[in-house]
Amino acid sequence: MRTLRRRGRLLNKDELVDNRPPYLGDLKVMESRDPELGRFVLRARLVESKAGTETEVLPGLHDAHLLFAGDNKMRLAGFERIDGADFAQTWSVELTAC
């Protein structure tokens, strides 16, 4: 999985092609209550599971919605919360067999 924004700003071509390694983990999407918004939101999470516990690899994607899915790839958009501030974020996800 790769993020396409940094603090809400869309990354340019040079920043996207800087050979950064992708984030790896299990993608989980479920509805959960957001206490700051006072409502339920669809939340996407990329987690790493070790010894029966899950650790978030990245900040969760709140109000997630699917932009594209096909050929084992998908794009999700929403917002991430960093240090109490909400920023637009887009994830480019490539699904692989385990």
Image: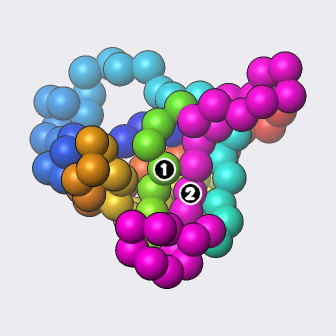
- What colouring does the structure picture have? rainbow
Vertical relation: 31 (above or below) 24: below
Per the rendered image, the range of residues in magenta is: 32-56
Q: Residue at x 39, y 67 (%)?
A: 36
- Does the magenta portion include 33? yes
Q: Where is mark 2, residue-wise?
A: 44
Residue 15, by quadrant, is top left
In the rendered structure, the answer to whether residue 20 lies left or right of residue 71 reads left
* Disc 1 residue type (three-letter): Gly
Residue 46, by quadrant, is top right
In the rendered structure, the answer to whether residue 90 lies left or right of residue 18 reads right
Task: Estimate the x, y position of residue 44 in percent, counting from the top left.
Answer: 56, 57
The crowd level at tag 2 (other Cα within 10 Å; few <14, some 14-19, many 20+) is: many
Q: Main secondary structure of the magenta part?
A: strand
Q: Residue at x 44, y 20 (%)?
A: 21
Q: Earlier in the sequence, mark 2 or mark 1?
A: 2
In the rendered structure, the answer to whether residue 85 lies left or right of residue 39 reads left
Q: Which mark is residue 60?
A: 1
Q: Which mark is residue 6?
A: none
Element marked by disc 2: strand
- Does the magenta portion include 76? no
The crowd level at tag 1 (other Cα within 10 Å; few <14, some 14-19, many 20+) is: many
Q: Who is closer to the viewer here, 70 or 7? A: 7
Q: Residue at x 44, y 43 (%)?
A: 59
Task: Estimate the x, y position of residue 88 in percent, counting from the top left.
Answer: 26, 59
Task: Estimate the x, y position of residue 84 in percent, counting from the top left.
Answer: 27, 50
In the rendered structure, the answer to whether residue 16 lies left or right of residue 79 reads left
Vertical relation: 57 (above or below) 12: above
Vertical relation: 28 (above or below) 77: above
Is the Cβ of the residue at disc 2 closer than 8 Å to that at disc 1? yes
Residue 18, by quadrant, is top left
Q: How far separated are the C-alphas under marks 2 and 1?
A: 6 Å
